[in-house]
Image (cartoon, rainbow, N blue to C red):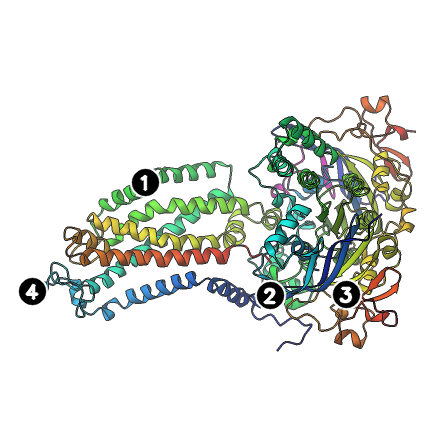
Amino acid sequence: MTSDGNSILEVRGLIKQFKTRYGILVAVAGVSFDIGAGEIFGLVGESGSGKTTVGSAIVGMYKGDGGEILYKGEDINKLASQRSKRSKREIQMVFQDPGGSLNPRQTIRQILLLPLELHQQAKRGRAWDDLVSEAISKVGLPLSYLDKYPQAIGGGEKQLVCIARALAPDPYLIVLDEPTSALDVSIQAKISNKLLELQKEYGLSYLFITHNLGLVRNLVHRTGIMYLGKLCEMAETREFFTEPLHPYTQMLLSSIPVLSDEEEQYKPTKVKPVGEIPNPINRPTGCGFHTRCPFGTGICREQEPGMHEAKDGHFVACHLHTG
Amino acid sequence: MEKAGTTPKQANPRWQRLKRRWYKFASNPLSLLGLAVVIALVVAAAFAYQIAPYPKHAGLFLDFANANQPPSLKHLAGTDVYGRDILSRMLVGLRYSLAVGLLVLALGVPSGVLMGLVAGYHRNTWVDTVVMRFTDLFMAIPPLILALVVAAMFTPGYFFVAIGIATAWWPWYARLTYSLVTSLSNEMYVKYAELEGAKPRRIMFKEILPNAVSPMFTKMSLDMGVIIIIASSMSFVGLGVQPPKPSLGSMVSGGIQYLPEQWWISVFPAAMVALIVLGFNLLGDGLRDVFAIEEI
Amino acid sequence: MAGDKKLLQVKDLLVSYKVYEGLLRVLNGVNLCVREGERVGLIGETGCGKTTILKTIVMIVPMPPARLEGGVVFFKGTDIHRDRKAGIRSVRKGVSMILQDPTAALNPTLSVRTFMADVLKGKSQRMSKAERNSLMQEALEKVAMPFPERVLDSYPVQLSGGMRQRVCIALALLKDVDLLLADEPTTSLDVTIEEQILELLNDLIQGSKKSTILVSHALGAIRKMTDRVYVMYAGDIAESGPAEALFEQPFHPYTRGLFAATPRLTGAGISDGIAGEIPSYLYPPRGCRFSPRCPERMPICDEEKPPVFQPQEQREVSCHLYASLTKSES
């Protein structure tokens, strides 16, 4: 399902549910997509859409309850501890909260050494020092930072350290879960640009999970949007923004607060949600969005729409667009 | 003076942290008092035999002519029924008290922390259940009784008093560590290490433990006072240091029958115990404030 | 629209914090005002001092280690810090604040019903249980809370972050105040709910004499929701003006840098942000606090703090670039 046939990550019908006090919560209800080599794939959605759970499953924090995840053909739908060394090394992650991701009792050097030690990149000693220095320079931070503790540096720089840590073991795919959401706008810009730069230079693939549509518009090659555990729409970013097909996408895009009248033109016509926000434990029948969709018809309540290729490379899961 | 608009160069970051902690600690006069008292006591105990005016009185010594003397310039704390200088005996007794305290902590803390660490990291597995129920077992018995029973199994002596108390003490450290570790296990940096394939042992000792250590210092300091009282209680009933060696507890018990006329025989040693407890408590409170989360 | 009477006036406010290393000069002479019925926005990034200003206005800033080094805060014409007791009384009655972190703001041992009942009891003693109940339900419905009945009996831990924030907003609205302060109220909410809440807050303020100060780093939200905007940087007000005008044409280099760094829907890419970092409050720059990072830096910027200029009607900028224009007398 990628634009080129060169995928390094294939997700097929991924399902993940959680037992809660009130019932079974299906966080991910059957998600399929591919990420190509050197591609930035953006996974967008509001809280509760399941996007973070997808990222966590890919990274190995959870084991999917159904479906497949294939990395370079290898089945990685298991916990990280059960995976091959190669996949553990080549798939890295950057989390949302830079402060919580770094051990306050370790120096930056020790933090960067951890992945190297665990993946045994090279012989101990000189080579590791070089790799650590290289990693921190790659993200644009000075070598003097290596001896500092995380508390001594700012939020944006902490996140750069996390990125350096993800780069150190020489990965192919980096899963970024809201990497800039906790940062100020001016720092977000710096980090985002740095991520883009690194991606271009090292040909990395990113799974970029976020709810910030502005970022997606400017950073991501292909975008997929999730609602209540399923993918609603998936397309190349420009297409996604200029011709959104799924009512949910239209609703989301039309309600973003923007900074200028010029940008207002770039939003689709206003789609206001109607009806009730569904309870994720008691999933609505048929299409997950039908309870709020202003265009819903009878079939939407009864049958779940599958992903159809409405246009070249543009996929939608909606009865209005099944051709 | 620093040039306006620039940040001062960071000296060694560890040193900076220490200096900031000291500033916070020193801003509370009570904490400083506690620290001063503790330092004074430790020094007094270390040099007890040198400072004591009558070091020989801390052993076998009889001088009935001078017995039961009230406090005077010659004997600042008076003499007891055998004519021994109470002050000197208090100083030597102090050594044993502090030694017992340190020994209990040295035995109880590492074992308790280790248990709590392992149980906390393996939360909700059989390891957790086994270790914590084992811990509960020990906690179910009142500490003083447990200590007495264990100490009584051996020949009397302060070393075994320490073992007895340590047996009763380690569960509390296990509990404390357990709760700290269970919450620390959810930190992102721990999850990261797990995802990268770090072995549990590495995670427990390198990632989690260093972050759990701070509250321990506070607890240890506050515990010193209680431990010493328990040790004194045990000497009170005859366990622990045997006569003629002095211990604060046995000095208090020995002098009770002479109250209230020869009050100094019990009161001074008791006051010393109180001073020890006060010093460590104030110090402990001060440490707790220092390690509390700072907010601007 | 807004009346002319000034409900809140902050003049030359200087607030510092005493810490181990010295004195943090957080607020460097802040001037702002809010008129009756006006919606004011305060834009600034982390560490610029916006929370300190709000806390000083509501008088919850802890006085050691913080110190009011200069300036005044007038609420309804009275200096609230001169007679602190009276000031606190006046502020508690007339101002309500929605905090950034809803989890910290709600007592975990009380149910939502208890919170709301407390507020309602404070308003008026003579209300029957049924009346209170219906008011509470209404308040929760207004903030688009699903299952209001269930929520009323819940404890904060049982609610999601977004729901907690909605409870906080509902609580703030229950209390009939003149001035509503909101510190990043929608940061933890989803885009579509954010819009609903923004509309709701909007509806409430328009037509009543309520004023608001909305603090946020969500620039789009501020543009939508406020009449007049202040931009803060490192304890100074960089510029101010009517929202629409300020967003169309920012004057201060910081504001420009900030807007340029915001990713746009046009897909034009993201600028490189603003070089450098916020200055140390311990040793702040002598002149303009933004000068070390300013692309338009001039020698005078390092020497003198820029006074306020008025490049246009109702627009004020604190920047030497506009020195040729009239100096405002505020």
Q: Amino acid at mark 2?
A: Asp
The residue indicated by pointer 3 is: C275
Q: Chain of mark 4?
A: B
Q: Which residue is mark 4?
A: B65
Which residue appears at 14% of the width and 60% of the height? B80
Query: Between marks 2 and 1, how big is the CA–CA gap?
Result: 48 Å
Please provide percent x and percent y for residue C112. 62, 35
Q: Amino acid at mark 1?
A: Pro
Q: Is residue B33 above or below residue B256?
A: below
Q: Indicate whether residue A72 is drawn in magenta.
A: yes
Q: Is C257 placed above or below A71 here?
A: below
On the picture, is A205 further left or further right than B286?
right
- Dot 3 lies on which element? loop
Distance of mark 2 from mark 3, alpha carbons? 23 Å
The residue stretch that appears in magenta: A62-83
Task: Give the amino acid at mark 4.
Answer: Ala
* Image-based side of C330 in relation to B34, left or right: right
**For mark 2, what is the residue?**
A147
The CA distance from mark 1 to mark 3 is 63 Å
Circle 1 SS class: loop
Mark 4 vs mark 2: in front: 4
Q: Secondary structure at mark 4?
A: helix
Magenta region includes residue A78: yes
* Residue at image mark 1: B142
Tell me if I can see residue A39 in this picture.
no
State how far apart marks 4 and 2 are (Cα). 69 Å
Chain assignment, label 2: A
Which subunit holds the residue at mark 1? B
Q: Give a yes or no on whether discs 3 and 4 share a subunit.
A: no
- Label 2 residue SS: helix
Category of crowding for the residue at label 3, using alpha-carbon neighbours closer than 10 angstroms: few (below 14), some (14–19), many (at least 20): some
